Image (cartoon, grey):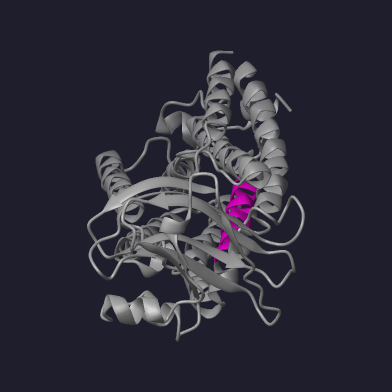
Amino acid sequence: MLKQTSILFTILIGFLICNVSNGMVVKEKINSNNNFVFLAKFCYSTTPGASLSYVGTAANASTSIYIYNDWATEWGVGGNSKYSCLERVTASTPQTNMNQLSANSSRVLLPEDHQRAHFWYVVAANCDSEVGEVDFTLTLLNGGGLWSAQFSYDEQGLEALYLVYFFVFLVLTGYTAFTAFKLYKANAFHPMIKILSGVIVLEFLSVFVLLCNYGSYSHNGTGGKGAQGFGELLDLAAQLLFILLLILIAKGWAISRVTIDEKRIVLGAMGVLTVLYFIMFVWIKAGENPAATTYMYDTVPGIILLVARSLAMLWFMWCGYNTYLEETHPAKRNFYTVFGIAFVAWFLILPIICIIAAAVEPWVREKTVLAFYVTTNALALIGVSFLLSPSRSGEYLASATKTSSEEYSSITTKSYDESF
């Protein structure tokens, strides 16, 4: 009951975070001594009805707003600091001087291109001195209805994606809770199943928080302040816990042996991996270039994370191979074969996603990558839940009540199966 209350409390906190909104609508007050300051990026689709409107005032009379298309002749120059300020602003699309705007006035541009989607960039610049203080509100809208208008084209469809997987993980979480309850009542709730339950709950909460964020965004153009990072952090925690579970299974815990072999090494390695993941997560968030269209694994911290995950895969393969060689039970050897092939593929999917990210156009990159990523994670968790379900794992999964190798060698699966 306490665990269920904790889960509900976490969901409530996630919901509240999602509704403390601040965020395309971009409403800010900046004060910069630079002569060229990036304000916003938005990808416009080919659907008619797109608009870019702004309201604002500038303390410096010569500070202006400049708009850029993603063409090489525009943002290719404007976004490149090797050019002079004058060269950068000259490359822009139509500009409007901010000192012509009062607090209640606005300008609207209609950036439409019926050939393909385009990223548009908004900057404040003052080549005579510095940008200074600018108080502004930008509203960037695509053509289309509720599911499209507020979203940059590269993010259109993400709300629907997370809505679908919210229900997928809701069903999976419900099944996990039911299974956990039955096993607990039968005194057969093995720690391995507890870890799997934790992974599924964390992934469900991640999807839920991100769905709240995109749902809020679709209605008012603002996302939850910190909700995106919170949802991604929950996913990161789920990934780390899942890697731990895979390593423990590959080492034969509760299948070929009762105790965890080399426990200190396992905990130490996972501790290092956790710290590394967290540092890279903070590095990516702190150093993220808001004008960039690159995927996170194109960055230095992203590449380090990819290498770390690849090393974890090699460790997983080594553990699984050694355990397979030591095992003589036919059902367990068959389990290791299926399990090993399936989850080496899961580890490899991230490099494959990176290749896909590099191959697709920037304006479809984010939604393509996230669709692959969320789908493979869902399939992986469904696969493990299937392999470790009580009706299938009776031949190879040790009961939670077994505590010695002597007991394990003569194990029957009765205590694990009777609850079903």
Within the magenta stretch, is there residue 358?
A: no
Q: Farthest residue to the bottom: give it.
A: 73
Residue drawn 70% across and 56% down? 148
412 vs 213, nearest the viewer: 213
Residue drawn 75% across and 68% down? 48
Q: Is residue 386 something one can see in this rendering?
A: yes
- Residue 191 appears at what percent x and percent y? 48, 30
Residue drawn 46% across and 50% down? 56
Q: Is residue 314 something one can see in this rendering?
A: no
Whether residue 37 sits left or right of residue 341 in the image: it is left
- Residue 108 appears at what percent x and percent y? 60, 61
Majority secondary structure of magenta residues: helix
Whether residue 107 sits left or right of residue 325 in the image: it is right
- Above or below for 196 versus 399: below
Residue 75 quadrant: bottom left
State the quadrant of the N terminus: top right
Residue 210 quadrant: top right
Magenta part of the chain: 366-384
